[in-house]
Amino acid sequence: MDDFIAARAQMALSLGFHIIFACVGMVMPFLMAFAHWKYLKTNNEVYKGLTKAWSKGVAILFATGAVSGTMLSFELGLLWPGFMKHAGPIFGMPFSLEGTAFFIEAIAIGFFLYGWEKFNKWFHWFCGFLVGLSGLASGILVVAANAWMNSPTGFDYINGQYLNIDPIKAMFNDAWFPQALHMTVAAFCATGFAVAGVHAFLIMKRKNVEFHTKAFRIAAGFALIGAFGAPLSGDVAAKSVAERQPIKLAAMEAHFETEKGAPFIIGGIPDQEKGEVKYAIKIPKVLSFLVSNDFNHEVKGLNDFPRDEWPPVAVVHYAFQIMIFFGVVMICIGGVYLYAFFFKKEWLEKNWLLKTFLFATPFGYIALEAGWTVTEVGRQPWIIYGIMKTVDAVTPMPGIQYSFYFFTAIFVSLSLIIIFLLRRQIQMVPKLYDPTDPQFNDKNKKS
């Protein structure tokens, strides 16, 4: 394997793995805090058990995210020393602040896990809520650093030198808010659907039904917030990309020719050599409207840019289509659930609705990974957009493919361990977390 390809593959694998745990860390503590709030308000012991069960899951996934995140920080220096040499002093601030948020999160998790019956009940609840706030802050800060790569600012680039560095301006670059907003909304959608799907499956097995029903409805509520918020945050992100990275927008839509009243393309197979899209559905003027609120706005095509600055058009286009497809599916599922919740309560108990959420378990994370692919691959061939190409940042050290194999083995091992631990947590619900289950009462009597 070529060292450059190996370095990119390793970074893609690491980011693709870590982003799942980053999103769980941003959202799952809020589900936990909401269940805890319900317990404090209702004194229903089922909510207490649910809070404890979810808190153990948060701890497991937090530990895994800490490992994968630490690996990523080392990989930046290992694989891309040319990038870190210049970029580190410029966008280092959000990484430093992310470290602070991480330590706050770790302390808050410790307080929450071991604070039952020891702290004031509302302080204890706040510790759980703080886990979510610090996790959310961590995610936003990392996205701010990534956004800087898409919208580099906070320095003057003169004769190959990075001068007059302003870390604050670099952190609050033009891309940070659209990216952070869309990422946060996507995290709520993906994590909500994943958790709801797991509990829907357990409800269908008719075990601990009350426990899992309460969990399902909380998770579904958070999933709906993300699903219905995604088009709005996506619109903000798309307008930002159109302004800052028009070539990325053109690749997303496989839009080759500059034109006014550009159509929005659904599906299709892009032919990069011929500069056309086959078998696509084109909705006239919609792309122009989406990027500017003007149906006759001119949208630049790929042919207006140097060929050596094109990203891999097919990869970006397919990833964008996948993101849109699963996003629309989740919105439809959310719409059905809302209709059932307000007008057809009996549907909430139906297996077909539970099966719908079960099948949708991975949809949010598929859309999330596809969106991240659009963000990262769509920036290529640049690692710092318009300033430094990725090929110029890679390490000259040989044998990177062995590092890629080694890191892949670590991620596979971590995945198996996580599956084992989370499966064990689910199996322990009757004994440890559900007070309505006879096994729970038997265990308490013995202890």
Image (tube, rainbow, N blue to C red):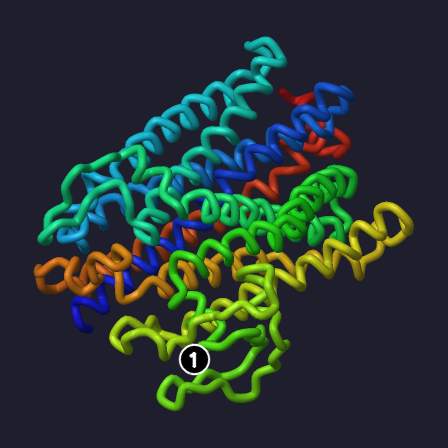
Quadrant of residue 393 within the rendered picture: bottom left
Residue 70 at least partly seen: yes
Q: Is residue 336 left or right of residue 215?
A: right
x and y, in percent, of residue 190 in the image: 57, 51
Position of the C terminus, as image quadrant, is top right
Q: Residue at x 80, y 61 (%)?
A: 352
Amino acid type shown at disc 1: Phe
Residue 349 at least partly seen: no
Q: Residues within 10 Å of mark 1 (few under 14, many from 20)?
A: many
Q: Note whether 363 is above or below 49 in the view shown.
A: below
Position of the N terminus, as image quadrant, is bottom left
Q: Residue at x 48, y 47 (%)?
A: 178
Q: Note whether 33 is above or below 177 in the view shown.
A: above
Q: Residue at x 49, y 48 (%)?
A: 183
Q: Note whether 16 is above or below 140 in the view shown.
A: below
Q: Residue at x 29, y 64 (%)?
A: 9
Q: Note whether 315 is above or below 75 in the view shown.
A: below
x and y, in percent, of residue 437 in the image: 75, 34
Quadrant of residue 241 within the rendered picture: bottom left
Q: Nearer the viewer, residue 49 or 207?
A: 49
Q: Nearer the viewer, residue 48 or 280?
A: 280
Q: Is residue 318 left or right of residue 361?
A: left
x and y, in percent, of residue 121 in the image: 62, 13
Count of number-bearing discs = 1
SS of the residue under disc 1: loop
Would you name the residue on which mark 1 appears?
256
Quadrant of residue 400 within the rendered picture: bottom left
